[in-house]
Image (cartoon, grey):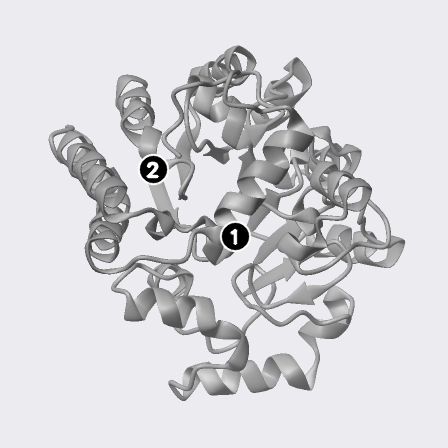
């Protein structure tokens, strides 16, 4: 049903932690995928499913549970959901991201030797599909029901528009559910014109903060431009979801983001959040007890605001995640040394010094 197509690898879904070097068509017919299906049907966790396993053990809604709710147990599986990561080409350097998902980070890491933080180096800054993988994607379009694009940043990748045009040319834009994750920095007329031709569109906005914190956490952000991009997306009337990483950087400023989300509520709308467990040195529990208590207060206020919204049903998973993080903050303190080193190193490289933003939480 679901297949994740990375820049040069394939796997059953985006959460699966083990990549296959097989092309999409060969992976779909492989013994490896058959074994994974057999394990899941037998209620055995495959080795690559640890993220869903951890989420469910933490009482969070996992991708596995969401997929089961949507599809049920499929007897005769076919590729109906293509989850495509075209390239790592990205105009942002988000502090919770890494080189394989951002060409800007890859370049920065190579120039400044940051592999100690990311755990690896890339041979080249840009990672892109081979022609064979692209052909496989296009060949699946006649039968695909759901098509998802993540990044990098899809809106700055030419192949993103090539695939959308192909869907339109063969008349599949009326049947395919189109899902796009974007940082909202490049919402052009072309983007709006293309997505508006699709009948069913869902846009996920990757937003970790608003204003100055957004520009710091997600380097490359010009908040006025991103805010304008968000407003353009909202004006289309398509389904929209805010997605936020709860990190040591974002949680101190979370209440302003929650206010922004509530202020912009519309028809098909919601917000989701997840705790930054990778890399662990950016987990909010790196702070001392006093600061963790401050974060608990901030989270409590955010939970109240979402709970008092008329759209509380659309925020339930975010509320659950924030509640879980409150528990973690009350009982756990992680070592902060790597966070301090990572933060000071990037501040120096990016010229993000305290005199630029003097009242930071950390």
Which quadrant would residue 18 be assigned to in this image? Answer: bottom right
Q: Badge 2, how many Cα within 10 Å: few under 14, some, many 20+? A: many
Residue identifier under label 2:
251
Q: Quadrant of the N terminus?
A: bottom right
Q: Earlier in the sequence, mark 1 or mark 2?
A: 2
Residue identifier under label 1:
338
Q: Position of residue 24 (x, y in %)?
A: 73, 65
- The correct choice, above or below, for 123 with respect to 36 in the image is above
Q: Position of residue 226 (x, y in %)?
A: 53, 18
Which quadrant would residue 26 be assigned to in this image? Answer: bottom right
Residue 72 in sight from this viewpoint: no
- The correct choice, above or below, for 270 with respect to 354 in the image is below
Q: Is residue 208 left or right of residue 124?
A: left
Q: Residue at x 71, y 73 (%)?
A: 27
Q: Nearer the viewer, residue 60 or 359?
A: 359
Q: Quadrant of the C terminus?
A: top left
- The secondary structure type at the circle numbered 2 is helix
- The correct choice, above or below, for 108 with respect to 324 in the image is above
């Amino acid at each position: 049903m679901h297949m994740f197509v990375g820049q040069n690898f394939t796997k059953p879904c985006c959460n699966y932690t083990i990549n296959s070097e097989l092309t999409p068509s060969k992976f779909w017919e492989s013994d490896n995928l058959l074994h994974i299906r057999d394990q899941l049907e037998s209620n055995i966790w495959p080795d690559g499913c640890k993220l869903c396993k951890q989420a469910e053990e933490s009482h969070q809604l996992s991708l596995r549970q969401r997929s089961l709710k949507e599809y049920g147990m499929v007897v005769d599986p076919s590729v109906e959901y293509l989850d495509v990561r075209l390239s790592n080409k990205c105009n942002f350097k988000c502090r919770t991201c890494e080189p394989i998902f951002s060409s800007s980070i890859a370049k920065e890491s190579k120039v400044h030797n940051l592999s100690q933080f990311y755990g690896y180096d890339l041979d080249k800054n840009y990672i892109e599909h081979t022609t064979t993988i692209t052909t496989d994607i296009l060949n699946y379009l006649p039968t695909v029901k759901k098509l998802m694009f993540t990044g990098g940043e899809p809106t700055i990748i030419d192949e993103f528009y090539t695939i959308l045009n192909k869907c339109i040319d063969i008349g599949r834009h009326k049947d395919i559910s189109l899902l796009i994750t974007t940082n909202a920095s490049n919402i052009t007329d072309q983007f709006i014109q293309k997505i508006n031709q699709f009948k069913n569109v869902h846009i996920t906005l990757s937003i970790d903060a608003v204003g100055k914190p957004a520009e710091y956490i997600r380097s490359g952000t010009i908040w006025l431009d991103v805010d304008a991009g968000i407003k353009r997306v909202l004006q289309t009337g398509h389904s929209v979801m805010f997605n936020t990483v709860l990190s040591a950087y974002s949680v101190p400023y979370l209440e302003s983001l929650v206010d922004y989300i509530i202020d912009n509520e519309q028809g098909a709308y919601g917000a989701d959040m997840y705790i930054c467990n990778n890399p662990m040195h950016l987990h909010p529990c790196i702070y001392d007890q006093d600061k963790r208590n401050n974060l608990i207060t901030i989270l409590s206020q955010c939970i109240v605001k979402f709970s008092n919204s008329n759209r509380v049903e659309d925020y339930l998973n975010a509320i659950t995640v924030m509640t879980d993080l409150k528990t973690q903050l009350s009982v756990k303190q992680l070592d902060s040394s790597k966070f301090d080193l990572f933060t000071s190193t990037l501040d120096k490289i990016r010229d993000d010094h305290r005199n630029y933003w003097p009242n930071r939480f950390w």
